[in-house]
Amino acid sequence: MNTFLVQNFQHIRSLAQEMENIVSTAGSTTGTLQNELAGMFAVTIVATYESIVRDTLIAFAGCHHPKFEKYIENEFSRMNSRIAIDDLYRYSRSFGLAGWTDPGTGRRSTIFHRLLNEQQSRIENRLRKDMKKCCKNLFDWRNDYAHNRTSKPTLGDICGSRRAAKYVIKAFSDAFEESQPDGCGQ
């Protein structure tokens, strides 16, 4: 796993632990404050995931040609929530990741589809959560808070979804890392 990904996941995990400690020790915090913290944390998580996706695409492009890297850097300078599962599938196809041709897979499936599929049952068994649904929930909660300043989920809901959704982002990063030309490190 690349260093950038590890650093970002560690940062989010540290924030989650600190926020959970603050909320659990400050018994007098109001529901409103807890909801505000949850909403802000959802925004932070999704912004971090956007940054990981953007940097993954830029690094991959840079392995092919400096002009391609610059183009992708400009194209994705403001990602703005273009990292839903369908967007990630589209990026994996349009960036030409290797195909996945196992029986029962779609004709346009890529290595990202394979890695995500491999993670799905493992994460469901371990965390008892659907990582794709958790990812969608985080995006929805981020949008609710960022655009309407409403936050219905608790900090626990957001932290739980983060634990599962990070595997979607990890699979995306790993797929691009596996597909890089020889001699090109991320």
Image (cartoon, grey):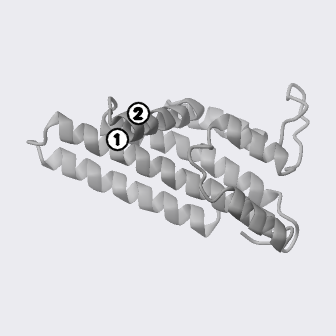
Residue occupied by mark 1 = 39
Q: Residue at x 58, y 66 (%)?
A: 4
Q: Badge 2, how many Cα within 10 Å: few under 14, some, many 20+?
A: some
Residue occupied by mark 2 = 144
Q: Residue at x 50, y 61 (%)?
A: 8
Relative side of 145 to 109, left or right = left
Q: Residue at x 42, y 51 (%)?
A: 44
Tell me if label 1 and label 2 are in contact, CB under 8 Å.
Answer: yes
Given this view, does label 1 or label 2 mark the residue nearer the observer?
Answer: 2
Identify the disc placed on residue 169: none
Q: Residue at x 88, y 35 (%)?
A: 108
Q: Badge 1, how many Cα within 10 Å: few under 14, some, many 20+?
A: many
As displayed, is residue 154 above or below residue 176? above
Foreground residue, 11 or 44?
44
Place of residue 160 in the rendered image (x, y in percent of width and height, measured from the top left) = 42, 38
Place of residue 142 in the rendered image (x, y in percent of width and height, measured from the top left) = 44, 39
Place of residue 70 in the rendered image (x, y in percent of width and height, measured from the top left) = 75, 68
As displayed, is residue 79 above or below residue 152? below
Place of residue 90 in the rendered image (x, y in percent of width and height, measured from the top left) = 76, 40
Which type of secondary structure does the marked residue at label 2 adopt?
A: helix
The numbered mark, 1 or 2, whose residue comes first in the sequence reads 1
As displayed, is residue 26 above or below residue 86? below
Q: Quadrant of residue 99?
A: top right
As displayed, is residue 76 above or below residue 65? above
